[in-house]
Image (cartoon, helix red, strand yellow):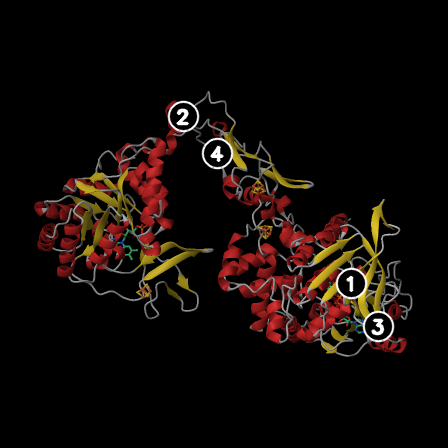
Amino acid sequence: MAEYKTPTSEPEFHANFSQIKPRMNNSEALFESSRCLFCFDAPCIKACPSGIDIPQFIRQINTGNTTGAARTIYEANYFGNACGKVCPTEVLCEGACVYNLQDVKPIEIGRLQSFATREAIEQDKKLFGPGAPNGRKVAIIGAGPAGISAACELRSLGYEVDVFEAKSQPSGLTVYGVAPYKITNEEVLAEMAYLENQFGFRVQYNQPITSRRELEALEESYDAIFLGIGLGATNPLLLPGEERHNCVGAVEFIEQLRMRHHQTAVGRKVIVLGGGNTAMDAASESARMGAEDVILAYRRGKEEMGAYEFEYDLAKGVGVKGLFNVAPVEIVGNGKVEGVRFIRTATLNGQVQVVPGSEFVESCDMVIKATGQAKQTQLLSLIPGLQVDNKGRIVADERTGQTTNPKYFTSGDARNGGAEVVNASAEAKATARGIHAFLSC
Amino acid sequence: MPDLSINFAGIKSPNPFWLASAPPTNSGYQVMKAFDAGWGGAVWKTLGVPVVNVSSRYGGVNYRDKRLVGFNNIELISDRPLADNLREIEEVKKRFPNHAVIASLMVQSRQEWHDIVRDVTNAGSDGIELNFGCPHGMCERGMGSAVGQEPEVLQTIVEWVMEVAKIPVIVKLTPNISDITEPAMAARRGGADAISLINTIQSIVGVDLDLFAPYPIVDGKGSNGGYCGPAVKPIALNMVKNCAQHPEVQLPISGIGGIENWRDAVEHILLGASSVQVCTAAMHFGFGIIREMTSGLEQYMTEKGFHTIYDMVGKALPNVKHWEDLNLKYKVTADINEEKCIGCQLCYTACEDGAHQAIRLQEGSRTPEIIQENCVGCNLCSLVCPVEQCITMERRDDGTEHLTWKERTEAGTIPTEFNDERAGGRHHWVPEPAAALGKEKHKTLPGKARQYAAADAAALEATPAAGAE
Ligand SMILES: Cc1cc2nc3c(=O)[nH]c(=O)nc-3n(C[C@H](O)[C@H](O)[C@H](O)COP(=O)(O)OP(=O)(O)OC[C@H]3O[C@@H](n4cnc5c(N)ncnc54)[C@H](O)[C@@H]3O)c2cc1C
Ligand SMILES: Cc1cc2nc3c(=O)[nH]c(=O)nc-3n(C[C@H](O)[C@H](O)[C@H](O)COP(=O)(O)O)c2cc1C
Ligand code: SF4
Ligand code: SF4
Ligand code: SF4
């Protein structure tokens, strides 16, 4: 295997992680936008969680009003540029485009979206600004897609907004989690800077909120608190040998990759445990980092994987091999990882059953656990009256995002249990309106 | 193999495709290259007293991603010395004796016309085309379309030319006139052998939004120019038809205007042209397009069993009627093929906003439904539908009745007042105007937001208006 040479420099890293949705040039945008039919009650709009008026912005691009297109996009979704590149458009807008029914390539909505917003960002087009100050203050915990979107919307409604972020950069998993071939750090951060510049909220980086005392301080000085904290670290597997060197969590591995690029260490033979989109990402990324063999091991059959089909195709396309109906029972090795002991499984009435006596060891020198992110239960337990459901998700009003503690509101992964950037962005916008309604009455 | 050759008013040509008098026929170099590529004839860029041209001089109309759907120019006739052109005509004819070289001419006085007609004849031209069409620059000097718009002047000049002409004379007409058949008849009265049409249409193709000047821009200023290219074909076809159908014109027609491929050429021919001329397409794509044109024409003729061009000339004319001769009893309405429908709902909005509210949306499906009672058979939906053969217009009358407006007029059954039963009375279904308000407001919201909006709207509806008892 090893289709990719291990990158040893920044240019080599970028070559291996070249953008799968590269920026359109003007001609491409003109040709592509010409094809849009301008459907009535367009199915693409309905398929977009943030409800961007897609035919409208496509037509604006086509008539040379790229700035207007950017405005249309941002009016619905503050992560307009990022979403164009990282959204699973195959199952969202582009998947709903009527051209699919004619077996014609759907409109490349995502790339057109990024085309328009990117231009606005680069030219620093002033499209929005804060509303007239209304004298109220909202604190936001977490500068991810949820937090930043809420901040923008609240600012436009005239609120004073302070964002508290544990890490040193904004945008949450957009910069720390999403695969680098979907979007570059520079691009994410440029959009963040653009938004901050337009709306003027304050972000305090390296400022994790962890104690009851800190929460109390926020409760005292702010009229409402928005929880945009996302999920936590990778769930432990609770298997023997999990502590061995080179057995890592996917989220942690990917974060390293996003931050340290070619300086991230990757094994020669990597086993990725899991069948979700994060597993696909981790596997693809290992392959692009030059791993000779990458095996994706999943408890059930291929069809039952949670990942989108196109994500699996993407991984297969870079040489990742699937190993299905196996459950890990031990991470073997002497100090560092040397393999994974698996047992074969069969699915009976939807339940995974192990096949007795079928154990075997698959050797490797790195294990990446893509078995889900934990919830931030510790922090949430410090908020009086705040309810979480049995899956650890914060319970909140569907429309307003208000939690069972009326002062707290929430959106994004922390509330929906983990979805996409576009969901976090759309929900947060609605929640900001919910906060406004709550504080105005 | 069908025979593509023509004898147009005595001008012989191996095929009906000629280059129109324009930049592609500006020099012997170009004309020879074109003949080499397969063009049957060339109408030389108009000769006259050499002029001075401006730059820039062309403007374009782009439609979405398509460039030069329309084209215009503010250039004048040839700016090259007459002697050079004559020498080159002679040379071309020596090398291509069987191809048609037609000299386009434009001068002012009777003497000048006599001289130049003799010159080009001596140079070996197969025919002459009189340019009475240029709609800019030359007309202010009393030439070009200024002549084309005055049938009497036109006739006089044709007569001057005919006094000395020994080769066939074609009169090229301007479309910048309300009735094209008038100058056509004048050309015939003057003794011309044929007509060609159309020349360019007076136009402004666009305005620069930053410089506030029309295209093309010459040092910050512009002028109206002459319009041509694919966009003008419908106008050209109608004018060709008008001349071909007119009993007092009866001259061979060289069809010009928006011809870019064999289909366009066949349309001109079916409406009465027996040679066709091309300018914009050759300027846009080069002489090579001739191969597609001749091979397409050949294929079409083979399939239809036409042996010569003349088997097809005017074939569509008997079917071009006056409105009053159309059958009022013929009735079609729209049909949607649900298998093919992709659910874009363009037909719905078109009919709803632009036609007769005869299409409704269906609960749980994106395929709209035709309300047959409301459908007037206008065709709009089938024109906007992006899927081939998805909306078809199906015949609903039984074909036994036939009645035209003319017949009704003769029978005295035409309506004479508003709401006359004989016009169908108030037969159009008219929805209540107020029902239009707020109809589409929440249509494009995404999933949940849409439910909420609908709920809000319903709640609002349920709340009695303030102040109501
Ligand atoms: C590996 C991976 C790949 C993904 N790929 C895609 C993709 O391709 N496309 C897509 O659309 N989505 C993708 N997602 C999902 C997407 O990233 C998330 O749905 C989205 O980022 C959720 O936004 P959020 O704001 O709710 O949470 P996050 O993005 O997680 O942001 C939460 C922020 O809060 C901060 N924070 C947390 N706790 C505290 C605290 N106590 N105090 C202060 N700050 C705190 C965190 O540092 C972080 O910045 C991916 C997710 C993962 C894990
Ligand atoms: C740049 C340009 C210059 C032209 N010059 C002449 C001309 O000198 N004499 C003439 O009779 N017609 C002239 N025409 C008109 C063309 O011969 C032709 O009638 C017209 O362009 C319509 O044909 P088309 O749609 O194929 O271009 C000119 C057209 C263009 C575009
Ligand atoms: S569904 Fe496709 S064609 Fe229709 S409006 Fe959306 S992008 Fe355009
Ligand atoms: S086509 Fe372009 S390059 Fe050629 S003469 Fe005209 S302006 Fe100049
Ligand atoms: S325009 Fe055609 S494809 Fe679109 S909804 Fe109507 S019938 Fe279906």
Can residue A427 be seen by looking at this rendering?
A: yes
Q: Mark 3 points at which residue?
A: A335
Q: How far apart are marks 2 and 4 (CA)?
A: 17 Å
Q: How far apart are marks 3 and 1 (CA)?
A: 14 Å
Vertical relation: A91 (above or below) B222: above
Q: Is residue B418 left or right of residue A184?
A: left
The residue type indicated by label 2 comes to Arg
The answer to whether the residue labelled 1 contacts the one labelled 4, judged by CB atoms less than 8 Å apart, is: no
In this view, A124 is above or below B223: below
Which label is found at residue B408? 2
Q: What element carries label 1?
A: strand
Whether labels 3 and 1 belong to a single chain: the reply is yes
Where residue B447 appears, as percent x and y from the top left, is: 71, 52
Look at label 4 and name its amino acid. Phe
> In front: mark 3 or mark 2?
3
The residue to which callout 4 is attached is B418
In-front residue for pair A341/A75: A341
Please state the horizontal and vertical placement of residue A145, each as a whole percent of the image.
72, 67
Instruction: Using the numbered discs, state the Cα–Cα distance from disc 3 to disc 2 in whole angstroms.
Output: 102 Å
Q: What amino acid is at disc 3?
A: Gly
Mark 4 element type: loop
Q: What element carries label 3?
A: loop
Which residue lies under the disc numbered 1?
Answer: A363
Q: What's the residue at 79%, 70% (across, down)?
A: A246
